[in-house]
Amino acid sequence: MEFIKNNILLIGLVLGSGLMLLWPGVKKSASGVPNLSPAEAVTLINRSNAVVLDVRDAAEFAAGHIAEAKHIALDDLPAKLNELKKYQNKAVLVNCQRGTRSAKACEILRKAEFTQVNNLQGGLDAWLNAKLPVVTSQSSAKKATAKPAEKVEG
C-alpha cells in the first residue's frame, strides 16, 4: 500500500499510456468497421480492387475525389442501396471529407449486409494530407469529351 501512495503519479501514467495504446483497436472494433489510413486504403484499392464510395454532397465531390469513386450522398444512400447490391460481397472503401459521414454510411452498409466495408479514417482531408491524388469532375469531363489529336503530316 505504501508503494502505491508513493508512486501514484507513475502508476497513473502507466495506466493512461496503456489505455492510449489500446484506444485505436477499441475504436476500430466499436463500429465493426475497420478505419483505414490513406496508405492502407491505397493497398485495399490496389490489392482487392475495392469500390470507392464517396458520400459527400455533389459540390464537394465535384471539387475533388478519389479516382474511380462512385458518388452517392449520405442522405441518398438508404434509397440507393440497390445500386450497390452488386458490391455487397466486395471490398468497399467509404469516404467523406473528414470521416464522420462515412462512418454513418458504413453503419448503413453493414445493416444492409455488406460484408467488407471499410472507412477512410480522416476522410479526403487525410487523403490529401498524405499527398495522394484526386480528380475533379471538370478534369473527368474534359477527358471524356476530349477530341483525338489530329495527325500532323510532314
Image: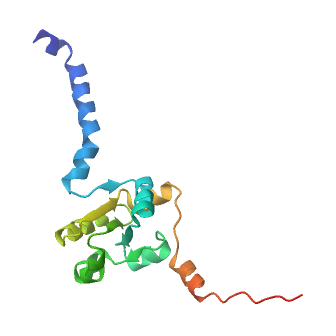
Quarter of image, res 22 = top left
Q: Residue furthest right?
A: 154
In the displayed structure, would residue 141 be above or below residue 90? below
Q: Residue at x 21, y 29 (%)?
A: 15
In the displayed structure, would residue 17 be above or below residue 61? above
Q: How many marks?
A: 0
Quarter of image, res 113 = bottom left
Q: Residue furthest left?
A: 1
The location of residue 134, given as percent across then percent down, is 51, 68
In the displayed structure, would residue 32 be above or below residue 64? above
Q: Residue at x 39, y 69 (%)?
A: 52
Q: Is 1 or 93 nearer to us in this picture?
A: 93
Q: Is 115 or 145 nearer to us in this picture?
A: 115
Q: Is 148 or 140 nearer to us in this picture?
A: 148
Looking at the rendered image, the quarter that the C terminus falls into is bottom right
Q: Is residue 68 left or right of residue 142?
A: left
Q: Is residue 24 left or right of residue 67?
A: left
Looking at the rendered image, the quarter that the N terminus falls into is top left
Q: Residue at x 53, y 64 (%)?
A: 133
The location of residue 48, given as percent across then percent down, is 39, 63
